Image (spheres, grey):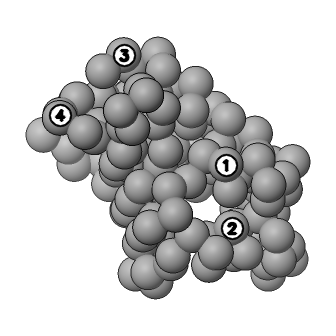
Amino acid sequence: MNAERIRELLAAKADALIRRDAGGLDALIHPSFLYCNVGGQVLDKPGYIDAYCASGRVVFLSQKVSDLRVAGFDGFTVANMTLDDNYVADGRTVEAKYHSLCVFGVAPTGDLHWAAGQTMAWSEARS
């Protein structure tokens, strides 16, 4: 799988989060989506869109991807990355770095949809 294609999808996701474009974010996410946030909360597609886009509880100011690694498999692609996030939550601006793992379903047409993800707290210890 082409890492540039995954990078473009991640950029579109970040753009939708920043613009709070729930429809744009909805188009990128698989209907059976599952996500585990850094706090351990598991969200489905509607829950993710509400929490990070529609509700205003978390408002993204920026999200940058680095250290992207991509592995392709039959029918899906896995991406591991570092996220540099800048957002407002509970009236407080947060600048934080996270490790994130994303799984993308690959349709027979070649279209990609974000199917699953997990975000973990940043740790300097890496192998």
Identified by mark 1, the residue type is Ala
Q: Quadrant of residue 1?
A: top left
Identified by mark 4, the residue type is Phe
Q: Position of residue 99 (x, y in %)?
A: 38, 50
Q: Position of residue 126 (x, y in %)?
A: 20, 43
Which residue in the structure is indicated by mark 2?
Answer: 49
Which residue in the structure is indicated by mark 1?
Answer: 27
Give me the C-alpha separation between circle 3 and circle 2: 26 Å
The tag earlier along the polypeptide, 1 or 3, is 3
Vertical relation: 41 (above or below) 109:
below
Vertical relation: 94 (above or below) 68:
below
Viewer-side residue, 80 vs 76: 76
Q: Secondary structure at mark 2?
A: helix
The tag earlier along the polypeptide, 2 or 4, is 2
Q: Secondary structure at mark 1?
A: helix
Neighbour tally class for label 3: few under 14, some 14-19, many 20 plus, Cα within 10 Å: few
> Which is more foreground, mark 1 or mark 2?
1
Whether residue 70 is visible: yes
Give me the C-alpha separation between circle 1 and circle 4: 22 Å
Which residue in the structure is indicated by mark 3?
Answer: 2
Give me the C-alpha separation between circle 1 and circle 2: 11 Å
Whether residue 39 is visible: no
Q: Position of residue 105 (x, y in %)?
A: 37, 45
In this rendering, position of residue 126 left or right of residue 30: left
Identified by mark 3, the residue type is Asn
